[in-house]
Amino acid sequence: MLGVEELKQKVAAGEIETVMIICPDSECRPKGKTIEANYFCDSVLAHGKNICSAIYVVDHNCNIVTACEICTWNTGFGDFQAYPDINSLKIASWMPKTAVIFTNMQMSPSDASPVWVCPRVILKSVEEKVRAAGFSGSNAASELEFFMFN
């Protein structure tokens, strides 16, 4: 993990030049933006960054999923506001001079309600229900499958 002050020091020293902000789409694929590190520290940390709402209504074939009412052809594809989750800040070992951070999605800068189709919001909701049911925490894992055909 990387703290905000440590990030700012690394940016000032030229060790970090870009920050990737990540917001998982409706199929949990990482989407987001790559931002110049000084701009991230000066603006995005405090004010967030706009992300197009279409990331939550596009399936794996890049088709618009019309069943989702969060944004449609009729209402348009506006922006949500992505606020960095400081607890997820890390150095991206696979990219030089880059840090990576996950975001928490809100409807807009003036509307702090969470974007209910965001996988991170859904997971937090499930965790709250697990704790409310009397369990101390939750564990999850993905099911990885491999198929080989002749």
Image (cartoon, rainbow, N blue to C red):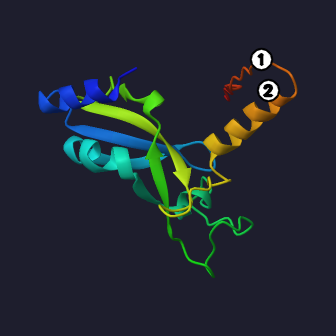
Quarter the N terminus occupies: top left
> At x 62% / y 61%, what residue is drawn?
57
Identified by mark 2, the residue type is: Arg
Of residues 96 and 91, which is closer to you in this image?
91
* Residue 63: numbered disc: none
> At x 73% / y 40%, what residue is drawn?
125
- Decide if residue 111 is on the left or right side of residue 2: right
Residue 88, how many percent across, how many down? 46, 29
Identified by mark 1, the residue type is: Ser
Residue 63 vs 36, above or below: the answer is below
* Residue 131: numbered disc: 2
- Decide if residue 103 is on the left or right side of residue 123: left
Residue 50, how many percent across, how many down? 42, 59
Residue 80 vs 119, above or below: the answer is below
> At x 71% / y 64%, what residue is drawn?
68
Circles 1 and 2: CB distance less than 8 Å?
yes
- Decide if residue 46 is on the left or right side of residue 8: right
Looking at the image, tell me whether mark 1 or mark 2 is earlier in sequence order.
2
